[in-house]
Structure formats: C-alpha cells, structure tokens
Amino acid sequence: MLIWVMGTIIGKGFVQKERRDIIKRYFALISIAVLFLLSSCSENIEVVNIKDKSLSGQLLIQKAEDNTSSREMTKTIKDKQKIKQVLTMVEGLEVKETNSENVTNQLKEQNNYLFYFSEGEKLETSKKAPYAFSVLSDGTFIFFYKDFNAPQKPRITIEKHKELFNDIKQILEINF
C-alpha cells in the first residue's frame, strides 16, 4: 500500500523534481533497511543432506520408553538397501540449531527412537556413532551429525513428521 501511495505521489508530479529525487532515495533506503531487518530476524534454517548414504553397513534402532530401554525395544538392520532408503527419506528435512539442554529435555519428556548408523559391517557400540539421529514420538527429528563423521550442534526439525516416521518404521518392520 505504501509503495502504491509513494508511486502515485511521485509519478503524478505532485512534488517538485528535486524533492522527488530525495523522496525516492529515502524510500529506497527505508526499503533496504526493512528488508535487512526482516532477514536478520529469520531463523537460520538448514536442510538435511547426507552425501554418501552407502557408508553405513548396519543400523541399530533403540526405543526409549519412560527413559528406559530393553533388548525387546532394540533392532539391528543389516540390509544396506533399507538403510540407504531411510537416509534418503530424511534427506531434505528442514532443521534449525537447538541447544543440548533443549534436546535432553525433549528426550526425557517423550518416548523416542535412536537410529544409530555404523560404518562397515560391524556395529561397535563402545565407539561414537559415525551418524545418528533421534525421532520423538510426536514426529520431531533431532540430528546430531551434519554428515557421516561430522558431528555438529543438535539440529531439530522445524515441523513434525509423524507420517514420515511411521513410513520409516514400516519399511524397517519396527513393531515396538
């Protein structure tokens, strides 16, 4: 609306030429300032991108229910096609940085699944995972790595993806 009013005033010759030039400059500066403020207020949104999905030879899924787990709530997947499919499914999710305290609180408040990917054929639980992410029961994904062997501050999905999570559970035949 403001742009239309300014254009009408300037274009119709209601203002002298010198003043029109000054108004145009001020209007341009104000527009740039508003755009700068709007862009600086937005959150730093990233997209999940996993470069080499074939690095993982095994996937361990473990459910934490009421902050505890058991062997009955654990499953190992060795099918490389299924592992690659899961990594492809989470690729492209929009995430934003969050702090570790927020992640810890959310993991305590909700049941969640940890997806622990290993390199090669052997799963070494004593070592740090080369790639892992968690999914909360409400469909929120939490990523701890930018890519394989590239830890980062936790990133959390902007939106909940319960249907995607259910699709992943179905593909991996997770019944717990």
Image: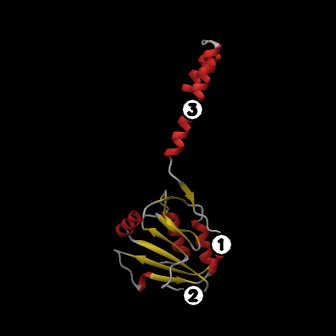
Residue 125, image x and y in percent?
A: 49, 84
Q: Is residue 75 left or right of residue 102?
A: right
Task: Answer whether residue 1 is visible to the viewer in this image.
Answer: no
User: Which sits earlier in the primary sequence, circle 2 or circle 3?
Assistant: 3
* Residue identifier under label 3: 31
Q: Residues within 10 Å of mark 3 (few under 14, many from 20)?
A: few
- Residue occupying the point 51% across, 40% down: 37
Q: Nearer the viewer, residue 23 or 119?
A: 23
Residue 22 vertical position relative to residue 63 in the rendered view, above or below: above
Secondary structure under the numbered disc 1 in the rendered image: loop
Secondary structure under the numbered disc 2 in the rendered image: loop
Secondary structure under the numbered disc 3 in the rendered image: helix
Q: Which quadrant of the rendered structure holds the C terminus?
A: bottom left
Distance in Å between CA atoms under marks 3 and 1 = 43 Å
Q: Which quadrant of the rendered structure holds the N terminus?
A: top right
Residue 166, image x and y in percent?
A: 50, 69
Residue 165 vertical position relative to residue 24 in the rendered view, above or below: below
Callout 2, which amino acid? Lys
User: Which sits earlier in the primary sequence, circle 1 or circle 2?
Assistant: 1
Callout 1, which amino acid? Asp
Distance in Å between CA atoms under marks 1 and 2 = 18 Å
* Residue identifier under label 2: 122
* Residue identifier under label 1: 52
Which image quarter: residue 123? bottom right
Q: Is residue 79 left or right of residue 64?
A: right
Residue 151 vertical position relative to residue 126 in the rendered view, above or below: above
- Residue occupying the point 64% across, 73% down: 53
Task: Answer whether residue 111 is visible to the viewer in this image.
Answer: yes
Distance in Å between CA atoms under marks 2 and 3 = 58 Å
Residue 120, image x and y in percent?
A: 61, 84
Q: Are marks 3 and 1 in contact (CB under 8 Å)?
A: no
